[in-house]
Amino acid sequence: MPQIIETIDVDVPVRAAYDQWTQFEEFPRFLEHVESITQTTPTLTAWKINIGGQIREFEAEITEQHPDERVAWTSTGGEEVHAGVVTFHKLDEAKTRVTLQLDWEAKGLLEKLASATGVATHAIKDDMGHFKEYIESKGSPDGAWRGDVQA
């Protein structure tokens, strides 16, 4: 199962970076391949993504969440098989390091090729850059969910 780890520093306080990340329905604003996310319960999201013109739908369950520290999830249905965690590290009062680890199962020739050639890693790096631009340009998050989900 391929693994991608990407880190980016954002010029916002840790609370702002974390709070924005908990606004899953806003992900299409900065994640290129995400068409929509619907949060159906506090810990369950329904995703619609577009990978190379192929539409995929799946659900992901938040398996662990601690405000200003981490959000972990795993897919629960559909064609996508993946799990991930994003962590937030306070560098100073106005700067946060965001680290994303994504484990996924490449399906089909296109995804296997993207994994083997580094295209998938590059796409995640671009998306993290889009997140940085989005939250820094706003200065404050679109909302927040500060609930705690124990592993």
Image: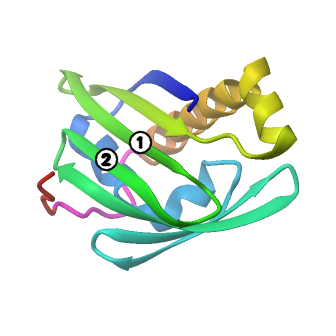
Q: Secondary structure at mark 2?
A: strand
Name the side, left or right, on which 125 lies relative to 62.
right
Which range of residues does the magenta coloring cover?
A: 139-146
Which numbered circle lies on residue 84? 1
Name the side, left or right, on which 151 lies relative to 106.
left
| Magenta stretch: includes residue 145 | yes
| Magenta stretch: includes residue 150 | no
- Assess whether mark 2 and mark 1 are in contact (beta carbons under 8 angstroms): yes
**Residue 13: where, in percent of width, then height?**
25, 35
Up the image or down, 17 lies above or below 94; here it is below
Up the image or down, 13 lies above or below 147; here it is above
Q: Residue at x 71, y 51 (%)?
A: 33
Q: Residue at x 17, y 60 (%)?
A: 146
**Residue 27: where, in percent of width, then height?**
54, 57
Label 2 is placed on what type of residue?
A: Ala
Q: Residue at x 65, y 25 (%)?
A: 121
Quadrant in the picture for residue 55: bottom right
**Residue 131: where, in percent of width, then height?**
52, 40
